[in-house]
Image (spheres, rainbow, N blue to C red):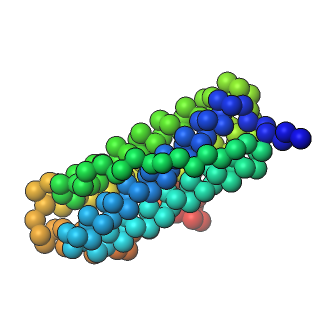
């Protein structure tokens, strides 16, 4: 008996997003290796943690595809882009990547709405909220390096930034989750 409750178009889109999340994990992994090679232990650690988070996003989509009775397709992922040229460039690349991912998420949300696939629409709301946090986090990273001097940040500023990054949480609080008792 066929238990698939996803249209072919939706199944293809979710599989493509699953691959995009796997690629995101590899991108963060490659940036983490670059940061480690540059001696930025705190930045590297943050990026390694973020690579694992992106892989978890991939798994979340994989599990949803299977739960809906569709076929999950494991595809090859492209190689990560070239290494960043400096910390400022690294954080800019993180932001650009997150904005691109947000656009892909929004396309699936719109498709699920247009198809009246309310289960997928509801499932994707978690990713919409996650992308708000991801973009906020990326902007916060760019603000930190901007304060440190941007692409011309000196060694002392980068040292302090690296130490701060080691303590940085993996996500940014969104205004939606903040209350007077939980600021």
> Observer-nearest residue: 179 or 176?
176
Estimate the x, y position of residue 114 in percent, counting from the top left. 67, 24
Instruction: State whether residue 144 is above or below residue 49.
Output: above
- Report the residue at 30% width, 66% height from top: 33
Point out the image quarter for the N terminus: top right
Of all residues shown, which one is farthest toward the top?
114
- Give the left or right position of residue 41, taking residue 112 as reference: left
Estimate the x, y position of residue 82 in percent, counting from the top left. 25, 51
- Report the residue at 26% width, 66% height from top: 35
Estimate the x, y position of residue 133 in percent, counting from the top left. 48, 52
- Report the residue at 22% width, 59% height from top: 87
> Observer-nearest residue: 59 or 87?
59
Report the label total: 0
Q: Can see residue 5? A: yes
> Observer-nearest residue: 99 or 175?
99
Which quarter of the picture shows residue 182? bottom right
Which quarter of the picture shows residue 36? bottom left
- Give the left or right position of residue 138, taking residue 56 as reference: left
């Amino acid at each position: 008996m066929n238990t698939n409750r996803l249209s072919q178009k939706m199944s293809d889109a979710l599989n493509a997003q699953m691959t995009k999340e796997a690629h995101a994990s590899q991108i963060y992994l490659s940036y983490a290796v670059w940061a480690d090679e540059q001696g930025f232990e705190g930045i590297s650690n943050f990026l390694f943690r973020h690579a694992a988070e992106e892989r978890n996003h991939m798994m979340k989509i994989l599990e949803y595809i299977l739960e809906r009775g569709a076929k999950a397709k494991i595809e090859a992922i492209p190689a990560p882009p070239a290494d960043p040229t400096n910390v400022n460039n690294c954080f800019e690349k993180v932001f650009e990547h997150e904005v691109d991912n947000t656009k892909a998420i929004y396309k699936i949300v719109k498709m699920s709405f247009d198809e009246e696939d309310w289960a997928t629409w509801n499932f994707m709301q978690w990713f919409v909220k996650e992308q708000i946090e991801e973009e906020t986090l990326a902007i916060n990273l760019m603000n930190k390096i901007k304060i440190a001097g941007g692409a011309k940040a000196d060694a002392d500023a980068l040292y302090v930034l690296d130490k701060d990054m080691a303590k940085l949480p993996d996500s940014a609080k969104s205004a939606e989750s903040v209350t007077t008792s939980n600021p």
